[in-house]
Image (cartoon, helix red, strand yellow):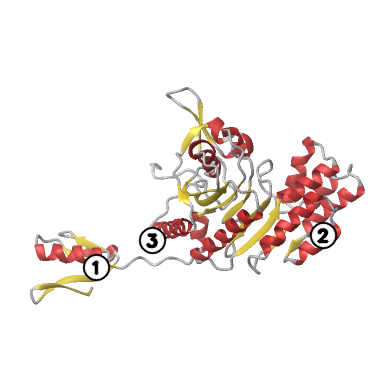
Amino acid sequence: MNHAWLLPEYIEDILPPYARQAESLRRRLLDLFDGHGYELVCPPMIEYLDSLLTGAAGDLDLKTFKVVDGLSGRMMGVRADITPQAARVDAHLLDRQGVTRLCYAGPVLHAKPDGLLASREPHQVGAELFGHSGIEADREVLALLLAALAVTGGVRVRVSLGHAGLFRALSAAAGVAEAAERPLFRALRAKDVPALDRLTEGLAAPWRAAFLRLPELYGDAAVIAAARRELPDLPGVVQALDDLDALLALDAGLAVDLADLRGYGYHTGAVFAAYVGGQAQAVALGGRYDNAGAVFGRARPATGFSLDLRRIVDSLPEPAARPGILAPCTGDPALAARVAELRAAGERVVVEFPGQAAHRGESGCDRQLLKQDGGWTVAPL
């Protein structure tokens, strides 16, 4: 049996009318970003591996498809995330001294899916802000994410905030060994209490208690007050809680989760994840990732987010097909002029070829052009 039409696992087409819905949403999001001063960049799908995976972006190693460049013999990678590419553009190509705001939209490819229902070809639409380390940048980026989610029309939007700096402060003060830090980070992210209990056995009582308490500190703004009372009074902890307080003030619907950690060795400050509908996986991820451009020669402060357009479209109601107008296939100049007029006005006009009348239902048209009184008139089909 011929299976040439089959696609690899977790790779799929986007068919009409979903493709049109996704493209319309992409345009609206880029227009939103442009209105906030974010300039569009289009990095390549593939580049040298040491550029894609250097420094903080090394966490993407297992997700990245790797190939040998037939021209240079060097290893290349298909991008698994556009954010490191935006950092390269800012650090190496633009070389601006002040704040740089960039946005992008395009597919990425993952060697392994993020989850059972995830695509290996997410379509990222994102915004990145470089050059400012203050909370003002985090507030702008988070506000832009909230505006982007509003544009999508997703129902039951939930945004959860965390802070990588809090974990780093506790880990440093507790003297957690470098080899033990990543497993501890993962256990906190998974809220794996038995693993946390085992991994913190050798820590002094105050630090162990703090790590074991983190998975329980989630909810509304009251969590911040509880954390101030119960967590060690370290400068890094205080700063992280102050940052989260400032971000929570943006919207009453924001939540906080102090065990919400991602991007070990990548994120350096406030992080956030957005969920819509009943989906368990986030449709948007973001946060602060200072110094990502260091490998390119400029260690710039940075914060941003990216949305997965595929997941967002999956969360939306089924789109209706766009109606259209069916036009006969003739050489009438008056008809051609009328079709051009309708298309210029935003209408979808489909020319019906000879012998296709039996398949009109497949055209998606609900109206037709009829010649009446010497002119071409739009009438119900």
Q: Report the mark closest to the observer, 2 or 3.
A: 2
Q: Is residue 357 visible?
A: no
Q: Report the mark closest to the observer, 1 or 2.
A: 2
Q: Nearer the viewer, residue 353 or 249?
A: 249
Q: Which mark is residue 228?
A: 2
First along the sequence among labels 2 and 3:
3
- Dot 3 lies on which element? loop
Separation (CA) of disc 1 from disc 2: 64 Å
- Dot 2 lies on which element? helix
Residue 380, horizontal then vertical, whole percent? 23, 75
Per the image, the residue denoted by label 3 is 17
Residue drawn at 88 percent across, 44 percent down: 201
Residue drawn at 74 percent across, 45 percent down: 185
Per the image, the residue denoted by label 1 is 325
First along the sequence among labels 1 and 2:
2
Asked if residue 361 lies left or right of residue 357, the reply is right
First along the sequence among labels 3 and 1:
3
Q: Tally the numbered discs.
A: 3
Q: Nearer the viewer, residue 58 or 91?
A: 91
Residue 113, horizontal then vertical, whole percent? 57, 46
Binning the other alpha carbons within 10 Å of mark 2 as few (below 14), some (14 to 19) or many (20 upward) gives some
Residue drawn at 54 percent across, 33 percent down: 51
Asked if residue 24 lies left or right of residue 74, the reply is left
Position of the C terminus by quadrant: bottom left
